[in-house]
Image (spheres, rainbow, N blue to C red):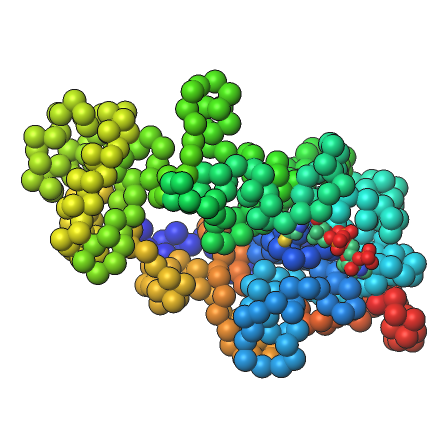
Amino acid sequence: MKKEEFFKEVINNSKGPLEGIKVLEIGGMHTAPMCGMVLADLGAEIIKVEQPEGELVRYAGPFLEGKPPQETSTYFLSINRNKKGITINMRHPEGQEIFRDLAAKVDVLIQNFKPGTMARWRVGYDDIKRLNPKIVYISISMFGQYGPYHKRPGFDPLAQAMGGIMYVTGMPGEMPLRTGNAIVDNSTGWMAAIGALSALLYRKETGKGQHVDISLLDNTVYMSDFGLMAAAHTNYHWVRNGNRHPSVSPFNTYQTKDGYIFIIIGPDSHWAKFCRIMGREDLIADPRCKTVRDRGANAEMIDQLTAQWAKGKTVEEIMNIFLENEIPAAPIWSHKDILTNEHVQERGMVAEVDHPAAGRVKLQGIPWKHSLTPGKVRTPAPTLGQHTTEILTNWLGYDQEMISSLKERRAI
Ligand SMILES: CC(C)(COP(=O)(O)OP(=O)(O)OC[C@H]1O[C@@H](n2cnc3c(N)ncnc32)[C@H](O)[C@@H]1OP(=O)(O)O)[C@@H](O)C(=O)NCCC(=O)NCCS
């Protein structure tokens, strides 16, 4: 199908399927901002609240060329586009009051402080529910809002450590590894967005809002694949096994003449094709490797056979052979490779936006393709406090004098 065919019914001026939904985001780093970005990318109007000095991630590089540094962090810019930004000092009673007034006007509130912090500022779920009974209030934390560990703070790698990912990631017998990117922070943000969307659907039917409690550890356990169940009911002990799959083979990164390639042979029909490619038709019906189960049980032998075959060819040669035979395989791309790839570009996954300090910049695109109401990267992340005046004026009716005086008192 051609791109134009997929989008033939597109509504041109739509911001996305969530247009009209209002969201307030506070907290920072990665999890709450990722949840906010999902909703923003899908068209919601989102106000991001930062402390007057700006959130920590603004000061984390790598930085774009341009000034000042708090506006040029690629980390901050890549997870906060499509949002409006306001500064509020939550330690200040007047700051708390402004936050409550804004929270009374939104559909969704997202926060990722330690459990208890929002209540200490008198903006916890019960405080906000009194003002806005229909609020969908999303709380993201390391361990959740209740449970023996709930007061403890945390970060992505700690959830990877305790949630089973690290135990099974790395080479056999070597140090446990985390994933290269922040898989738990990212997916916790997505899970929080799913929590928000499902609660919004429920609210549409019943008129009732609710508190949604999302924890990094719960989310990591949810990603256990079969590990938890196998540990509970079988003798299988899942250990670090490099890039190999616990029960499918070949399933690994193989060295070629000019780089690595990932090969997976799952279905028996693909195995038969692969045997023909290798000139080993005798193995198609061999009892050691006839079915996926047989191949998993003899992974060592299958892995060696595949490695032997791959090392005499280039990545491109193997890709071409596999493409002809409709068997999936993949070269290992860097982010630089991704930037220039024709398919990634056609899918709109390299978006561009005008940045006030650095000019036109590239960043990741929108993964959901809605045929009627696709989301888009409309604006870069806000500069520090960029929309403070606009929001206090348009949402709460403050005048310039009130805003200046709040600034003087360091409430915003
Ligand atoms: C990230 C984390 C470890 C930080 O812990 P912390 O800073 O010690 O504690 P809190 O979460 O209670 O945050 C309070 C701090 O937020 C800061 N803050 C953020 N926004 C603020 C605002 N608008 N106004 C005032 N203070 C603000 C202040 O420094 C405040 O410290 P203070 O209470 O001493 O004044 C903790 O928030 C946490 O565990 N979050 C849940 C899991 C998570 O999302 N982790 C990050 C993954 S990327």
Q: Nearer the viewer, residue 216 or 88?
A: 216
Quadrant assignment, res 300: top left
Picture residue at 60% right of the left edge, 45% below the top: 158
Quadrant assignment, res 79: bottom right
Picture residue at 27% right of the left edge, 54% below the top: 260
Q: Residue furthest top?
A: 233
Q: Nearer the viewer, residue 176 or 299?
A: 176
Is 93 on the left-hand or right-hand side of 41? right
Q: Please state the horizontal and vertical placement of residue 405, each as a whole percent of the image.
A: 92, 74
Q: Nearer the viewer, residue 66 or 177?
A: 177
One can see residue 4 in this view: no
Is 354 on the left-hand or right-hand side of 53? left
Picture residue at 20% right of the left edge, 40% below the top: 304
Q: Quadrant of the C terminus?
A: bottom right
**Location of residue 285 with respect to 55 vertically, above or below:** above
**Location of residue 205 with respect to 142 vertically, above or below:** above
Q: Please state the horizontal and vertical placement of residue 108, each as a whole percent of the image.
A: 72, 47
Ligand 1 shows up in the quarter that is bottom right
Q: Please state the horizontal and vertical placement of residue 123, each as a whole percent of the image.
A: 84, 49
Q: Please state the horizontal and vertical placement of residue 116, each as a whole percent of the image.
A: 81, 44
Is 286 on the left-hand or right-hand side of 265? left
